[in-house]
Amino acid sequence: MDISRSEQRVLHALAQGGTIAVLRDAEGRIIGYELINREGWRMPAPDQLLFRKLKAKKAIKSSGGRPYRITRRGLELVRSQVDNR
């Protein structure tokens, strides 16, 4: 299954130890997403469409209310690069 360049960028950051945090307002509605790499730096965040595509492909998962992480399926989808750990 092919994935887009923007999906590749997000999955590479997650494969190296990054997370996606969901930002919510006072009423609990989703207002955005925050992609944080393994060093703690914020990267350009995925939009809602990209986030839903990654969830639909079962490439990311959250458990216990924690930030989203890459799944084993997501690791299979991402193309290997030298800097991936």
Image: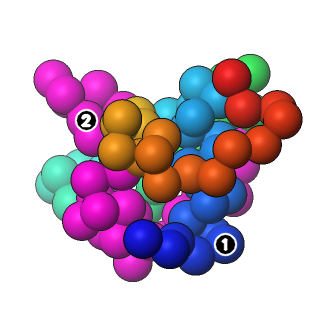
Residue 57 screen position, x and y as percent? 29, 62
Q: Is residue 60 magenta?
A: yes
Q: Earlier in the sequence, mark 1 or mark 2?
A: 1
Residue 1 drawn at (x, y percent): 42, 71
Q: Which residue is mark 1?
A: 5
10 Å crowding of disc 2: few (<14), some (14-19), many (20+): some
* Amino acid residing under circle 2: Ser
In the displayed structure image, the side of residue 65 where residue 48 appears, left or right = right
Alpha carbon of mark 1 to alpha carbon of mark 2: how far? 23 Å
The image's mark for residue 26 is none
Task: Report which quarter residue 44 is drawn in.
Answer: bottom right
Query: Does residue 66 appear in this view?
Result: yes
Task: Please give the residue where the numbered disc 2 appears in the rendered image.
Answer: 62
Q: Which residues are magenta?
A: 42-68
Residue located at (58% from left, 35% from top): 15
Figure quadrant of the C terminus: top right
Q: Residue at x 77, y 43 (%)?
A: 81
Write the residue at 21% across / 60% down: 29
**Label 2 secondary element:** loop
Q: Is residue 44 magenta?
A: yes
Q: Is residue 22 visible?
A: no
Q: Amino acid at mark 1?
A: Arg
Asked if disc 1 and disc 2 are in contact, CB closer than 8 Å, the reply is no
Check disc 1 and report its element: helix, strand or loop. helix
Of circles 1 and 2, the one toward us is 1
| Residue placed most toward the observer, 8 or 32 | 8
Percent position of residue 3, x then y: 52, 72
